């Protein structure tokens, strides 16, 4: 497994650990409809973001220590091609989600529902991005 | 036009003293995994990388990579 595939796995794992509980808690408390700004919601998001950053930071240190030579190398043409393809696919997810959040949701939702839908779109786009990276490396392995 | 790119990198590596994928990769500036993917026909390299591979083995490009049109072999038969 290449260093770049490992970092893509790390990003997927970090997002799953940080944002699956976040959206589960948000969904479970959706009946309370918090106002904007809501310190509880902001705190919850801050915890998820800090958890994600901590996992990424520790994970990158561990991976770059384990494959120091590979980590120092710039991405080669195959890495760049995989990155470009995965980013362009994630872009469509992001733009589709943002159209929904920005143009449709304001007519039937408000406050944190819209904010969380935007966050979910960003997380989903990132999952598609890193998921596509992993799938591409696996297919070409 | 349908077809696929085949290559003789494995054979050429063998001819050049069992050159490793890592060494070939290092000489043209890609990872060992990229050479493995090219060799297995799972990734088509850029023209630049293809020429560099041919240069390493000191052969023309056509001796490393070949284009096989779909159904070409069945038409010939």
Image (cartoon, rainbow, N blue to C red):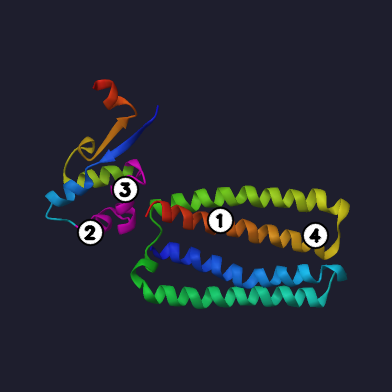
Question: Crowding near pointer 1: few (<14 within 10 Å), some, many (20+)?
Answer: many
For residue A120, the mark is none
Q: Which of marks 1 and 2 is in front?
A: 1
For residue B23, the mark is 2
Residue marked by disc 3:
B38
Q: Choose the circle earlier in sequence order: 1 or 4.
A: 4
Q: Distance between the residues labelled 1 and 3?
A: 23 Å
Residue marked by disc 1:
A129
Question: Crowding near pointer 4: few (<14 within 10 Å), some, many (20+)?
Answer: some
Q: Choose the circle earlier in sequence order: 3 or 2.
A: 2
Question: Quadrant location of the C terminus of chain B?
Answer: top left
To which chain does the residue with label 1 belong? A
To which chain does the residue with label 2 belong? B
Which quadrant of the figure has residue A121? Answer: bottom right
Residue B36 point in image, percent of width and height: 30, 53
Segment colored magenta? B20-47
Q: Is residue A100 left or right of residue A132?
A: right
Q: Distance between the residues labelled 3 and 4?
A: 46 Å
To which chain does the residue with label 3 belong? B
Q: What element carries label 1?
A: helix
Q: Which of A3 and B3 is in front in this view?
A: B3
Residue A102 point in image, percent of width and height: 78, 52
Residue A99 point in image, percent of width and height: 74, 48
To which chain does the residue with label 4 belong? A
Residue marked by disc 4:
A114
Which quadrant of the figure has residue A42? Answer: bottom right
Residue A35 point in image, percent of width and height: 88, 69
């Amino acid at each position: 497994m290449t260093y770049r595939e490992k970092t893509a796995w790390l990003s997927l794992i970090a997002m799953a650990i940080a944002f699956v509980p976040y959206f589960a808690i948000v969904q479970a408390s959706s009946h309370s409809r918090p106002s904007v700004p809501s310190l509880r919601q902001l705190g919850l998001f801050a915890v998820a973001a800090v958890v994600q950053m901590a996992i990424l930071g520790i994970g990158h240190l561990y991976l770059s220590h384990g494959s120091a030579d590979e980590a120092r190398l710039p991405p080669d043409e195959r890495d760049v091609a995989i990155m470009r393809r995965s980013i362009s696919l994630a872009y469509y997810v992001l733009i589709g989600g943002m159209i929904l959040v920005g143009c449709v949701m304001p007519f039937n939702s408000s406050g944190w529902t819209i904010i969380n839908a935007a966050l979910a779109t960003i997380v989903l786009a990132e999952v598609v991005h890193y998921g596509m990276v992993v799938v591409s490396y696996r297919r070409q392995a | 036009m349908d077809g696929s790119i085949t290559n003789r990198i494995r054979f050429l590596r063998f001819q050049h003293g069992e050159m490793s994928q890592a060494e070939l990769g290092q000489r043209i500036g890609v990872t060992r995994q990229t050479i493995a993917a090219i060799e297995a026909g799972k990734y088509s390299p850029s023209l630049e990388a293809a020429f560099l591979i041919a240069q390493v083995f000191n052969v023309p490009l056509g001796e490393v990579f070949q284009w096989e049109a779909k159904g070409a072999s069945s038409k010939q038969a």
